[in-house]
């Protein structure tokens, strides 16, 4: 990243510092939800004061908690998007956005606040929320070696389903459900998080009831003991991607060599991503600009090689009201023939098997897009087919 926050004086003060590309620096990154309240930001008007130093008390709760966590884990530097990127400089955003993937890939750890609605919510809270009706207490009396009662330990556990499911259903439950933690995690459906979660080397989640640690090949969470982790082979059953982060990287090496497999995977990925929420509609393509893994020409979210099938998309209706839940925003995002031009969930109509047998009765005469910035996978300002 261009800048990092330097944690000083026992985490009581911070200063924004410019990084030196020739020097390696370990840092922690924060994954959070902006929400409806704009978080503390660095602007051109306060850039110098940020670099001179400021007190941690001036930051909102989520940022303070992230700084304290990073410091107590032994790290001096942290990257927080709204503070490390000048927010009122369009040129800077265009130059920093292409680096977003490397920022999370290079961070030694990503701290995630899945239960925080916005930057003011914080995540280092008391766990008294376990008295929620979804949990039941299990008091256990413990004694001295001589058998004398010494105290009581209370364990809280999720209430059972009225009709208990077979044991394997409990063991195989999707760890993403645990991350969601009832009610659903506010990060769970955030568009930027899909890229952040895939690209981060390690992520530490601070949920409402417990912590979770995820790396490329493992997922640990407090409510699941070691035996169950071994039974699950310590793999994250991603609802969005169907793979762990390690498998994601390995799969990309294979599918890049297969036209059919890459096309199928890419469209499945886009369908999952399109269901996510974005605070800014124009982030539709920048939020996944770190994911593309093909050397083919990229046209507003579509690979030129797979253009015929990529044009066969439709908006997904809201089955509850039998209405389309996708619209086009006021700001230009992509040409109308691209899935990215629609705000909301989309579905591709090409069968995911035997695609090579499809006989396309069309010929692409010309197709091109005009980039809005420096990122070849980011914003476009025009497109023609």
Image (spheres, rainbow, N blue to C red):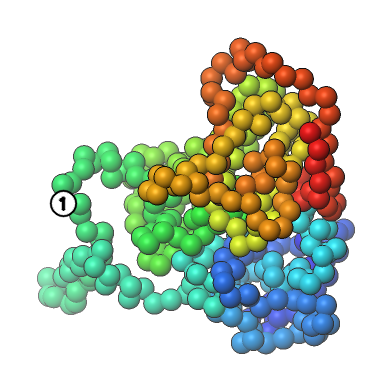
Residue 297, given in percent of the width and then of the height, sits at 80, 33
Mark 1, other Cα within 10 Å: few <14 / some 14–19 / many ≥20 = few
Q: Quadrant of residue 338?
A: top right
Viewer-nearest residue: 183 or 384: 384
Residue 146, given in percent of the width and then of the height, sits at 13, 71
Image position of 336 with respect to 214: above or below: above
Q: Residue at x 61, y 87 (%)?
A: 57
Quadrant showing the N terminus: bottom right
Q: Is residue 210 left or right of residue 363?
A: left
Q: Residue at x 66, y 45 (%)?
A: 340
Residue 105, given in percent of the width and then of the height, sits at 68, 51
Image position of 120 with respect to 178: above or below: below
Q: Residue at x 55, y 41 (%)?
A: 315
Q: Is residue 143 left or right of residue 27?
A: left
| Residue 175 appearing in the image | no
Secondary-structure class at tag 1: loop
Q: Is residue 164 left or right of residue 347?
A: left
Image position of 165 with respect to 225: above or below: above
Image position of 314 with respect to 213: above or below: above
Quadrant showing the C terminus: top right
Q: Quadrant of residue 20?
A: bottom right
Disc 1: which residue: 162
Residue 258, given in percent of the width and then of the height, sits at 66, 21
Q: Quadrant of residue 193?
A: bottom right
Label count reads 1
Q: Residue at x 51, y 75 (%)?
A: 122
Viewer-nearest residue: 125 or 81: 81
Q: Is residue 158 left or right of residue 64?
A: left
């Amino acid at each position: 990243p261009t800048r990092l926050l330097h944690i000083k004086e026992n985490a009581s003060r911070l200063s924004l510092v410019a990084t030196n590309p020739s020097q390696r620096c370990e840092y922690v990154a924060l994954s959070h939800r902006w929400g409806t309240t704009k978080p503390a930001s660095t602007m051109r008007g306060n850039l110098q004061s940020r670099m001179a130093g400021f007190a941690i008390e001036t930051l909102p709760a989520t940022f303070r908690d992230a700084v304290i966590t990073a410091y107590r884990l032994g790290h001096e530097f942290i990257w927080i998007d709204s503070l490390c990127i000048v927010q009122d400089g369009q040129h800077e955003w265009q130059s920093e956005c292409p680096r977003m993937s490397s920022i999370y890939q290079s961070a030694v750890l990503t701290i995630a606040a899945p239960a925080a609605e916005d930057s003011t919510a914080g995540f280092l809270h008391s766990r008294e929320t376990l008295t929620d009706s979804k949990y039941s207490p299990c008091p256990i009396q413990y004694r001295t070696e001589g058998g004398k009662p010494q105290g009581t330990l209370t364990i809280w556990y999720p209430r059972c389903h009225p009709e208990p499911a077979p044991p394997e259903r409990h063991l195989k439950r999707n760890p993403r459900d645990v991350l969601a933690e009832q009610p659903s995690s506010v990060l769970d459906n955030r568009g930027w998080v899909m890229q952040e979660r895939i690209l981060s080397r390690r992520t530490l989640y601070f949920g409402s009831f417990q912590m979770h640690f995820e790396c490329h090949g493992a997922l640990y969470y407090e409510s699941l003991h070691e035996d169950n982790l071994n039974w699950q082979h310590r793999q994250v059953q991603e609802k969005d991607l169907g793979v762990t982060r390690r498998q994601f990287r390995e799969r990309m090496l294979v599918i890049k060599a297969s036209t059919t497999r890459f096309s199928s995977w890419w469209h499945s990925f886009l369908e999952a991503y399109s269901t996510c929420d974005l605070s800014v509609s124009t982030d539709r393509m920048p939020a996944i600009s770190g994911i593309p893994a093909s050397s083919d020409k990229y046209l507003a979210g579509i690979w030129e090689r797979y253009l015929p099938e990529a044009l066969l998309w439709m908006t997904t209706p809201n089955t509850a009201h039998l209405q389309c839940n996708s619209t086009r925003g006021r700001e230009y995002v992509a040409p109308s023939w691209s899935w990215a031009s629609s705000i909301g969930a989309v579905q591709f109509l090409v069968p995911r098997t035997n695609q090579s047998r499809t006989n396309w009765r069309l010929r692409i005469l010309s197709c091109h897009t005009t980039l809005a910035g420096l990122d070849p996978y980011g914003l476009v300002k025009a497109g023609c087919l």
